[in-house]
Amino acid sequence: MVLATEKSEDRVPAAIPNHLKGEGMKATLSKKGKLAALVTVSALAISGALVSPAKAADSTITLWHIQNTDPGPKLIQDAVDRFQAENPGVKVEVSPLANDAFKDKLKVALGANNAPCIFPTWGGGPLNAYVKAGQVINLNTYLAKDNYKNRFVPASWANVTFDKKSYGVPVENSSIAVIWYNKAVFAKYNLKTPKTWDELLAITKTLKSKNVAAFTLAGGSKWPSIMWYDYLVDRIGGSTAFTSAALRTGGKFTDPAFIQAGTMIQDLIKAGGFVKGYNGLSYDNSQQRAPLYAGKAAMQLMGNWEYYGFAADKKADEFGFFPFPSVKGGKGDPTSVLGTVGDNFYSISASCPDKAAAFKVIQYLIDDKSVAARVAAGRIPPVKGVKLTDPFAIELNKMIEKAGGVQLWWDQYLPPEFAGLHLDQTQALFGLSQTPKGMADAQEKLAVKLLGPSKK
């Protein structure tokens, strides 16, 4: 872990000590001692300019973050240093924390009304819980000033906005799931990238006839599998299908969209859509890439970070990507994406003593200089018109800018216990040892236990 670098404060001349000020001093001095006292006071003032401690800041802003991999910590500290240089009356105390430790520490701090002024979240359910508890502030007033909110791509606000009020600013990066495809395999069999689920099933049938699997999948790691289920629920039921069930505002995890999503996944499996042994492959050792490289699988649903894995293997030029397909009759916006646009989002606690200064610090984290630094680090900041040079990043950003919405990864949106069940149930669904209805029932049962009954 890289610790924040402490920045020296500007030195200022010390004031004359209180016991040497005012009429009391005059009364105690003899005529003969006045000159000596004056010399002493002057000497103290001059020496104080050289050795006195820094003037106390008018306010102190505490900032927690979880950027523990280079250059993450430096990106934040550089922005903070610039803020402090231009706002000398405000001191910013930066604390980097490990991901899991941060979650527990933040929960305790918020509960004790002793939270940091600025802290990151992934938005979604956990942030909404803090909102309901009155522990974070509504940022609409700050975002409206100088039309600041319009600086960001529209999709970036989806997971931090509740009842038309926004509670976090998108800062770090954009990560979304896309379907990667082997260009050579598609060219060999004259395939075009599918725009609909039916077209994807047709490609699957063609590839199976050539002894090629449509998809590879790191099912043993579980989280790659939930991308399929989560995307399909969105395409079938629209953006409110999941959120209304997760926030308990009328929807349930047993609603038709959830059961249909599970059914469509198992239909794809039964059609030979995945490589053999897919439910045991691990993402951590890149087992799922081997079938792609060997031409035994044509596609993979995975986050945009996979590009850098391809690049490391000197295979980046061999792959392209396209959006998750639409579903006939589905309510979902075909341009919406699964992932996070702005990860992390930075919020301000209700207990922060100087909320205006805290918001200004956040602005420095994503101002033009910070955006340029993030781009140089290979990130895609969630701002409009960001200047990118990498061809892949440019194409991906076009998809992000056009996105009608963004669905946060469910395992980040949901409470940990529910996320664990969702991961396990999805793996069982892919293993054909759980039915779509059985999975839906299990998820709704736990939702009622953890989140309460769903009601409008």
Image (cartoon, grey):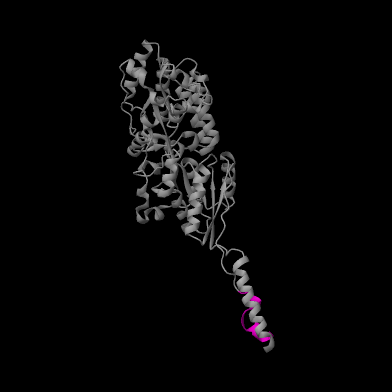
Who is closer to the viewer here, 246 or 190? 190
The stretch drawn in magenta includes residue 133 = no
For residue 146, side relative to residue 118 (left or right): left
* Residue 191: x %, y % from top left: 31, 18
Who is closer to the viewer here, 203 or 113? 203
The stretch drawn in magenta includes residue 27 = yes
For residue 283, side relative to residue 159 (left or right): right
**Residue 302, can we see it?**
yes
For residue 64, side relative to residue 177 (left or right): right
Which stretch is magenta? 16-29
For residue 298, side relative to residue 78 (left or right): left
Q: Is residue 7 above or below residue 248?
A: below
Q: Quadrant of the image for the N terminus?
A: top right
* Residue 378: x %, y % from top left: 44, 38
x 42%, y 41%: residue: 375
Who is closer to the viewer here, 183 or 214? 183
* Residue 274: x %, y % from top left: 43, 18
* Residue 456: x %, y % from top left: 41, 41
Main secondary structure found in the magenta portion: helix
